[in-house]
Image: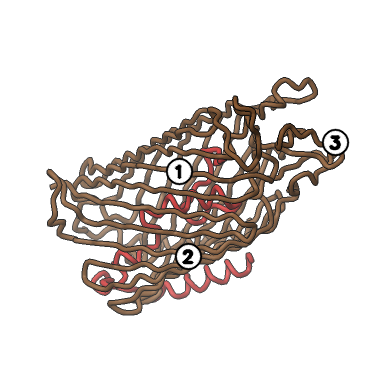
């Protein structure tokens, strides 16, 4: 798994040599291309963090509540 | 793990050096947030199943939760933004009601909700976040503080983050850290409270420390991706004090239809979690976007999990977008899990909480979004910029089923 992550980082680093200019980012600036969840998706992330053991690496809750119901 | 952290640090040092020349040139400064924004968010969640942890892994899991929330984002000046996020979570829980299962009318069953006070509660949360951006918008600092309170639980948290953009904002590296200092007001199953052999928990604190590293990269004019790594350490009372366990080597005591607990769950007082995730978003054309996500998770309680999801936004007009989605999840069970009445009293740690069991889950979703960047429709001084509505159906192979409706209304002040 760690090797896979390192390979991904290396791929991203290498490709970072390709620079997309601000005026070329029209499609990347589409709201649906944002690399984050929408605000209303927080509730979905919360219930998943309660019902499943895994959390984190997705902007979800990593502490600060019992999640015991 | 050390290698991974070192790689992140090396990348940040190299690209910071590359960016030094760009820092010196004068840059047009646009406000980080043009005007005050208000988000009204809400959700309604319901679930049902037959493996309630409160009754030892066998019993109704029926639960509903309603969560009205408001988020106000205020630009303090060109560079600084203050965000206040406040909400409540009002829930009713059939399993929690069975902390004391014996109603005044004499009935008691793990599959029937009790009328006791523990059947409902309200969680109140407030989070404040202050962020500052540098003049060239390539450095962003933020600090946050949070409070959360419900009848048997109180949490205070604080944290901060730093994001660095470079390579003409094609690349971002960020780091965040949070601390949550929580306190239980432990409530125990009714039959154990006066049991002289029952040992209550001495330490009712639960502290969580998290460190997150993030890296995102524009790959082409249509593709961007990100990687995240979260390290989380939890210490203190990690058991839930009202979740029962019945031992197979202790004779069952059944009152009416209810099997009394022999003890409450006992879990280690520390847990270390690692979550590594990645996103890849692809703009296919003016009608379709693909959003994919994968996460691997592991912890020192023996749980490994994989999460994969895909969402396909479909733009049917310039203002309306549809959001079909699918998510798959699987996890292995914790070392301390066993189903109802299968633990031994000689074990050090035990739980029958099916959230820590071995299972797979499928989630199917659909949503619709409305966006008007000019916010022409008004309510008082606020223009409606966007509306998002979502529905998700969640099914575990253990039998738990859940549905969640959520919505968000984004307004901009004139």
Q: Residues within 10 Å of mark 3 (few under 14, many from 20)?
A: few
Residue B237 in view (yes/no): no
Whole-number angstrom distance, CA of label 1 to CA of label 2: 20 Å
Q: Residue at x 67, y 39 (%)?
A: B55
Q: Chain of mark 2?
A: B
Q: Colour of chain A?
A: red
Q: SS at mark 3?
A: loop
Q: Colour of chain B?
A: brown
- Of callouts 1 and 2, the N-terminal one: 1
Q: SS at mark 1?
A: strand
Q: Are marks 1 and 2 on the same chain?
A: yes
In the rendering, which numbered label is found on residue B213? none
Q: Residue at x 70, y 54 (%)?
A: B333
Relative horizontal placement of residue B44, taking residue B334 as reference (left or right): left
Q: Chain of mark 3?
A: B
Q: Quickly name the residue at label 3.
A: B251
In this rendering, which labeled residue sits more in front, label 2 or label 3? 3
Q: Quickly name the residue at label 2.
A: B364
Relative horizontal placement of residue B122, taking residue B25 as reference (left or right): right
Work out whether residue A7 or residue B362 is closer to the camera in this orientation and state it: B362
Q: Residue at x 51, y 56 (%)?
A: A57
Relative horizontal placement of residue B353, taking residue B19 as reference (left or right): right
Q: Badges 2 and 3: C-beta atoms under 8 Å apart?
A: no
Residue A28 in view (yes/no): yes
Q: SS at mark 2?
A: strand
The x and y percentages for residue B99 are 62, 32
Whole-number angstrom distance, CA of label 2 to CA of label 3: 43 Å
The x and y percentages for residue B53 are 65, 42
Whole-number angstrom distance, CA of label 1 to CA of label 3: 36 Å
Relative horizontal placement of residue B179, taking residue B103 as reference (left or right): left
Q: Quickly name the residue at label 1.
A: B65
């Amino acid at each position: 798994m760690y090797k896979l992550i390192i390979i991904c980082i290396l791929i991203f680093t290498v490709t970072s040599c390709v620079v997309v200019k601000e005026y070329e980012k029209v499609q990347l600036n589409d709201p649906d291309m944002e690399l984050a969840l929408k605000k209303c998706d927080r509730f979905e992330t919360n219930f998943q963090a309660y019902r499943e053991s895994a959390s984190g690496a997705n902007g979800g809750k990593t502490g600060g509540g019992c999640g015991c119901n | 793990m050390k290698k991974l952290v070192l790689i992140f640090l090396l990348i940040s040092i190299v690209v910071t050096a590359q960016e030094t020349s760009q820092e010196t040139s004068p840059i047009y400064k646009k406000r980080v947030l043009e005007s005050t924004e208000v988000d009204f968010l809400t959700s309604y969640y319901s679930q049902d199943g037959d493996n309630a942890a409160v009754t030892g892994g066998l019993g109704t899991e029926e639960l509903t939760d309603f969560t009205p929330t408001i988020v106000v984002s205020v630009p303090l000046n060109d560079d600084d933004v203050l965000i206040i996020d406040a909400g409540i979570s009002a829930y009713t829980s059939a399993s929690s009601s069975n902390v004391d299962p014996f109603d005044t009318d004499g009935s008691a069953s793990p599959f029937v909700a009790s009328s006791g006070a523990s059947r409902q509660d309200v969680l109140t949360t407030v989070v404040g976040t202050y962020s500052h951006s540098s003049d060239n918008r390539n450095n962003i600092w933020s600090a946050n503080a949070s409070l959360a309170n419900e009848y048997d639980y109180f949490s205070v948290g604080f944290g901060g983050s730093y994001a660095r953009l470079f390579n003409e904002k094609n690349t971002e590296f960020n780091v965040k850290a949070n601390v949550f200092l929580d306190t239980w007001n432990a409530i125990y199953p009714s039959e154990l409270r006066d049991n002289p052999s029952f040992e209550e928990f001495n330490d009712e604190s639960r502290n969580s420390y998290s460190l997150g590293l993030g890296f995102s990269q524009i790959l082409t004019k249509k593709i961007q991706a990100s990687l995240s790594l979260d390290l989380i350490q939890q210490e203190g009372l990690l058991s839930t004090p009202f979740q029962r366990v019945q031992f197979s080597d202790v004779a069952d005591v059944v009152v009416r239809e209810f099997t009394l607990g022999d003890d409450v769950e006992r879990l280690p007082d520390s847990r270390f979690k690692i979550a590594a995730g990645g996103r890849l978003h692809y703009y296919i054309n003016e009608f379709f976007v693909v959003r994919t996500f994968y996460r691997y998770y592991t912890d020192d309680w023996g749980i490994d999990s994989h999460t994969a999801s895909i969402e396909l936004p479909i733009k049917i007009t310039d203002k309306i977008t549809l959001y079909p989605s699918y998510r798959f999840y699987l996890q292995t069970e914790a070392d301390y899990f066993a189903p109802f009445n299968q633990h031994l009293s000689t074990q050090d740690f035990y739980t029958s909480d099916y959230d820590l069991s071995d299972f797979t889950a499928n989630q199917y979703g659909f949503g619709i979004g409305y966006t008007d960047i000019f916010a022409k429709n008004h309510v008082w001084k606020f223009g409606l910029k966007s509306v998002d509505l979502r529905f998700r159906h969640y099914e575990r192979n253990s039998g738990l089923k859940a549905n969640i409706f959520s919505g968000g209304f984004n307004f901009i002040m004139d």
